[in-house]
Amino acid sequence: MSSHGENDSGSGSISKSSELKDIFKTIRDLNLEGQMVGEDTEQVSWGASCGVFRDKQVTSQGQTVQVAVKRIRFFLLDDISFARNLHREVRLWSKLNHPNVLPLRGYFLEGKKAIPNLVSEWMERGTIIDYMKDRPFDSHEICTMVYGIASGLHYIHTEHSMVHADLKGV
């Protein structure tokens, strides 16, 4: 978080920046700052509170992989309590390991006011809506997909006592 907390508007910003660093220090191993290539960034989706972009990440092993970046339209330095909630979400999501739950690769904060970005694997076939569009499915295939979704949700709810609050296909 090198430049994210730098702000010349007074000591309150420095204090908030320090607090933000303290909040995220327990998950610094998930911080992907500096690993995003950003040259072919393409926005692929958006919602009320975020945009989703296709980008590339250079891993610690030097490999370049395509990733999805969920950029939340929020300045963490404006609301430290939101930062605490986001930290909790990132920490919990990073621990999930199930074939029907999209893995979290990490996060990075962007800009002087710390815009949060969550990085996950890129799904080449897109969202479930994209995948199902223009393709006929028989009832067995649909049941298999629904079972997979239910299996992932069951894992999140029962093994991690979490509730997915914003489930949708797009």
Image (spheres, grey):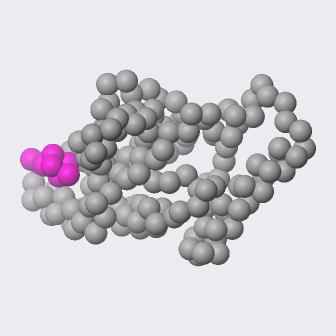
**With 157 as the anchor, is 90 left or right in this view?**
left
| Residue found 73% across the figure and 60% down from its top | 150
Report how many numbered discs are placed on residues in the image: 0
Residue 37 image point, x, y percent: 30, 32
User: Between 134 and 72, which is closer to the camera in this rendering?
Assistant: 134
| Residue found 21% across the figure and 45% down from its top | 112
**With 73 as the anchor, is 101 left or right in this view?**
right
Q: Main secondary structure of the magenta part?
A: loop
Q: Is residue 3 magenta?
A: yes
- Of all residues, the one furthest to the right in this rendering is 139
Does residue 119 sit above or below 26 in this rendering? above
Q: Is residue 119 magenta?
A: no
User: Between 67 and 75, which is closer to the camera in this rendering?
Assistant: 67
**With 138 as the anchor, is 30 left or right in this view?**
left
Does residue 111 sit above or below 160 in this rendering? above
**With 55 as the anchor, is 4 left or right in this view?**
left
| Residue found 20% across the figure and 52% down from its top | 1
Quarter where residue 25 is shown: bottom left
From where the camera sits, is residue 103 visible?
yes
Residue interval drawn in magenta: 1-9
User: Between 143 and 92, which is closer to the camera in this rendering?
Assistant: 143
Residue 69 image point, x, y percent: 43, 41
Can you say which quadrant of the picture contains the C terminus?
top right
| Residue found 56% across the figure and 39% down from its top | 123
From where the camera sits, is residue 89 visible?
no
Residue 95 image point, x, y percent: 46, 66
Residue 74 image point, x, y percent: 38, 48
